[in-house]
Image (cartoon, rainbow, N blue to C red):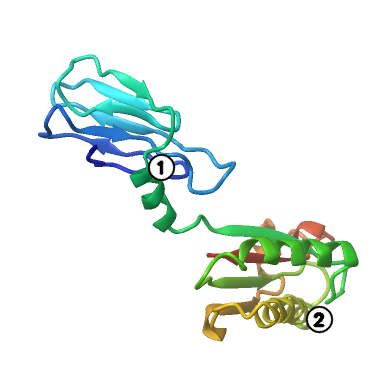
């Protein structure tokens, strides 16, 4: 049975060095989320040489050869598959856009929100959900505060509805909604620059962890 000394998922890098027997290997596992890249693993040997794993299920000896040998496994080891199943999923995030001054979503954006929630919270026990509502930098602060709060409540209502209807084990304390008003948009302005209508900031950002 192989001894797994390093795991990598979704774009990290790992350096290994030191004493290990010639029977030990390091394996780059398949991604925990389909369609995501595996990243790479770097194995550093005591003599200064290095081995690079860049494809799923590649394997290299930790020691014993100056020029490391790579093996491509025909299929993932069942032990590795079980380990990957316990790793936390990568966070999911999407942006849902509003018309100028509006606190409700259009049908197309509402459909996108529903699809996002169905895909990303129903199979993620114990999920934490963050909702951040924004406006562009036009108008006055009082109006933007109100509109931002309305946008946050629109999305929060849909999240709560999805959690309730699907009987998901997500606590109310794990759902956070913040109305950020125009602050994000104004942070991008140069001193003295006037805010312009900008759809990119008339948005609610939903993050699921």
Q: Nearer the viewer, residue 83 or 204?
A: 83
Q: Is residue 182 above or below residue 68?
A: below
Image location (x, y in percent) of residue 105? 84, 70
Image point (24%, 14%), residue name = 67
Image location (x, y in percent) of residue 69? 28, 18
Count numbered badges in the picture: 2
Q: Which residue is mark 1?
A: 12
The answer, for residue 45, to whether it is visible in the render is yes
Image point (34%, 46%), residue name = 79
Q: Distance of mark 1 from mark 2, alpha carbons? A: 43 Å
Image location (x, y in percent) of residue 202? 78, 65
Decide which of tag 1 and tag 2 comes sooner along the chain.
Answer: 1
Image point (44%, 59%), residue name = 88
Q: Residues within 10 Å of mark 2 (few under 14, many from 20)?
A: some
Q: Secondary structure at mark 1?
A: loop
Q: Which residue is mark 2?
A: 143
Q: Nearer the viewer, residue 176 or 36?
A: 36
Q: Quadrant of residue 177?
A: bottom right
Q: In the drawing, does residue 112 fall left or right of residue 89?
A: right
Q: Residues within 10 Å of mark 1 (few under 14, many from 20)?
A: few
Image location (x, y in percent) of residue 194? 78, 61
Q: In the drawing, does residue 118 fall left or right of residue 47?
A: right
Image point (18%, 34%), residue name = 17
Q: Quadrant of residue 205?
A: bottom right
């Amino acid at each position: 049975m192989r001894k797994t000394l390093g795991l990598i998922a979704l774009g990290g890098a790992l350096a290994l060095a030191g004493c290990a027997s010639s029977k030990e290997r390091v394996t780059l596992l398949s991604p925990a989320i389909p369609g995501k890249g595996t990243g790479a693993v770097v194995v550093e040997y005591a003599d200064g040489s290095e081995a690079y794993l860049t494809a799923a299920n590649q394997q290299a000896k930790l020691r014993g050869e100056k020029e490391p040998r790579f093996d491509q496994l025909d299929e993932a080891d069942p032990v590795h598959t079980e380990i990957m199943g316990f790793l936390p999923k990568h966070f999911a995030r999407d942006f849902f856009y509003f018309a100028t001054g509006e606190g409700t979503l259009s049908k197309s954006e509402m459909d996108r929100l529903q699809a996002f929630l169905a895909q990303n919270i129903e199979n993620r026990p114990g999920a934490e959900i963050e909702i951040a509502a924004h406006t562009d930098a036009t108008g006055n602060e009082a109006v933007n505060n109100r509109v931002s709060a309305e946008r946050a409540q629109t999305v929060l209502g849909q999240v709560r509805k999805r959690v309730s209807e699907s009987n998901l084990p997500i606590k109310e304390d794990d759902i956070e909604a913040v109305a950020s008003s125009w602050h994000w948009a104004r942070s991008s302005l140069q001193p003295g620059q006037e805010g312009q209508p900008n759809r990119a900031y008339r948005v609610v950002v939903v993050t699921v962890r």
